[in-house]
Image (spheres, rainbow, N blue to C red):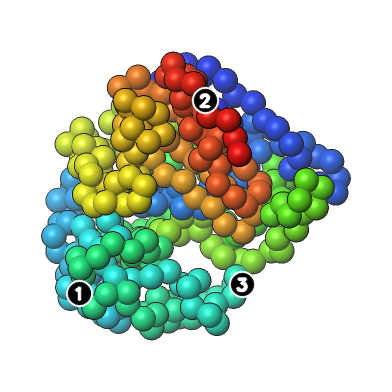
Amino acid sequence: MLVSKGSEVIAETAFGLANQKTGKRNTTTTLFKTESTGKMITAVAVLQLVEAGQLDLQKTIIDYWPESKIRNANKMTLHQLLTHQSGLTSPWERPDFEFKQYTNEEWWNFIETNPLVFDEPGKGVYYSSSAFEVLAKIVEKVSGLEFQDYCKEKIFVPAEMEHTYYTMDTTSYFSRGANPYRWIGSKTYYEYPVSHLQAGGAGGWLSCIEDFHHFALALMNEKLISKKYLDLMMTEHVDFYPGKYGYGMQIYKDLMVPGKTVYGHNGGGMGFSCDLFFEPESKTIMVTMLNMYGNSRSLTRNYMATVLGNEPQIPE
């Protein structure tokens, strides 16, 4: 975990084991899958192209991807995709989905043929990883770059994120990678197998706490998008229990820390949990990465509360 006030790191430490069998310990440079926190990266990519005049948030999928087979593609706007109002679900919600390597055609077949949650975009709010996969495809169509190359050139390099990688859904190929686990009891665990699910618009980048600290700094310091579009990203566009949702960003007002509004995203799945949240008034940044499946938000909340002068909550 890492806590900072702007660029000043207050605490940076590691706990536990990266590998339960070998006893290799986690360090502050260990690599973890960051899962849905990557939706912030996708939102930044979209807003960069909006700022450049290449995308319009009120235009639809069909405007930028005419051959798309997404149902209601002629109705779903970029704004609705960014705010989970499209009606799309996620590929892994299908009963026949397996966490394994799929061809590009198979992957998009899941997205295109999944039933819609509601038939009219904007009718409701439903968390959708497919929507962010579609956004990544639109970034590729407009920029002419593969999504991972766009993110590296336009986001990771400017933000000085030197250890963020596009990879499969495992860290085992990296000597600095943590193995993924689900804990069943205090001494009993399940180790997830290699699943070959690539990173993309929905998230899943491989990274470390220092790189995500750099991303939050670059975002707040307007190195990635201007203040106008950062404000738009941080605007409360829809209700999203237990808080609000902006563009690829969760918004917690008086929830994580009383009297403060905290912005960011969490992610979890296949043996990893990740939080990246910041409080812009004090420029407090909190990054938590775990190689265990579960909700890391209680850790994030307590560290954030302590730094901002509030009492931490006793964990259940």
Q: Relative to 91, does residue 71 appear above or below in the rendering?
A: below
Residue 149 percent coordinates (x, y): 42, 53
Residue 114 percent coordinates (x, y): 39, 80
Q: Which amino acid type is shown beneath numbered disc 3?
A: Lys
Task: Give the structural element (helix, strand or loop) at label 2.
Answer: loop
Rendered image: mark on residue 120: 1
Distance, label 3 to label 2, CA atoms, is 40 Å
3 vs 1, front mark: 1
Looking at this view, name the residue that lies furthest to the right: 22
Report crowding for label 1: few under 14, some 14 to 19, many 20 or more residues within 10 A (C-alpha): some
Q: Which amino acid type is shown beneath numbered disc 1?
A: Glu
98 sits left or right of 136 in the view: right
Q: Tag 2 or tag 1, which sits nearer the N-term?
A: 1
Q: Report whether residue 165 is seen.
A: no
Distance, label 3 to label 1, CA atoms, is 32 Å
Tell me the quadrant of the picture where the N terminus can be found: top right
Task: Give the structural element (helix, strand or loop) at label 3.
Answer: loop
Q: Which residue is mark 3?
A: 100
101 sits left or right of 142 in the view: right
Q: Which residue is mark 2?
A: 312
Closer to us: 68 or 112: 112
Q: Tag 1 or tag 3, which sits nearer the N-term?
A: 3
Residue 264 percent coordinates (x, y): 39, 40
Q: Relative to 48, does residue 160 appear above or below in the rendering?
A: above
